[in-house]
Amino acid sequence: MDDLPDTDPRGAPPERGQRLLAALRPVARQAALLIDRLRVLALAAGAAGAWLWGLLFWPLDVGSGWTLAGALLVLLALLGPALVLGLFARGLQELVALPGRLVATVRAGQGEAAAVYAGAGEARPARSGRIRRFWQVVRGLWALRAALLESRDLLIGSVALIRLASPVVLAVVVVAAGLGLLLIAGAVAGTLIALLA
């Protein structure tokens, strides 16, 4: 995770960018440690849910549509904790990548701004060169506009990551993790019962 440069093209220190990165980096490190564990738990809970469904409903009797609908609803309920954990792990993965994307976006914006400033500040050439200089400024402004739009999209996407830290989402993830562990224990117990029966 790179640091922002010490100064921007105008010579001012990028204090807000540094504060944002200083706040994001510890969270991103903790999220990186948690991602692999969440993925393993999500896969294990999904496999346990599918195994339990198989133990309960295999061979599937599709005598009526209600039986099939009930079996599918049970399957969705058993796979629900794995889905919640997988989505949360994906959100954490985005959070881990956010500091690097912010640094890259800031650097690209600084480069575009420097190019526009350099193009506008050139010595006044002869009359035929004014059109070229004007065109360079227009192209630089267009590139700066594109970089700013990319920054806006990045910030809008990062605002959505704030929802990961809401108490409701964290409570849902904790409940899903607990249910996932129960599913794993239930699958082991169900398998032992099926083998002993």
Image (cartoon, rainbow, N blue to C red):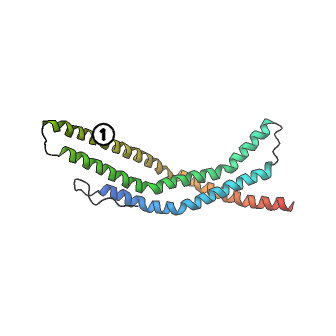
Please give the name of the residue rendered at 47% of the width and 47% of the height, measured from the top-left corner: 160
Q: Callout 1, which amino acid?
A: Trp
Locate the N terminus and report the quarter of the image it occupies.
bottom left
- From the viewer's perspective, is 128 left or right of 87? left
On the image, the x and y values in percent for residue 116 come to 24, 45
Task: Look at the numbered disc 1 and give the secondary structure of its residue.
Answer: helix
Locate the C terminus and report the quarter of the image it occupies.
bottom right
Image mark count: 1
Please give the name of the residue rendered at 38% of the width and 58% of the height, measured from the top-left corner: 21
* Disc 1 residue crowd, few under 14, some 14–19, many 20+, Cα 10 Å: some
Please give the name of the residue rendered at 67% of the width and 60% of the height, measured from the top-left corner: 181
- From the viewer's perspective, is 52 left or right of 146? right
- In this rendered view, identify the residue nearer to me: 49 or 131: 131
Q: Is residue 130 above or below residue 110?
A: above
- In this rendered view, identify the residue nearer to me: 64 or 101: 101
The image quadrant of residue 3 is: bottom left
Which residue matches tag 1?
Answer: 142
Please give the name of the residue rendered at 34% of the width and 52% of the height, measured from the top-left corner: 106
- From the viewer's perspective, is 110 left or right of 75? left
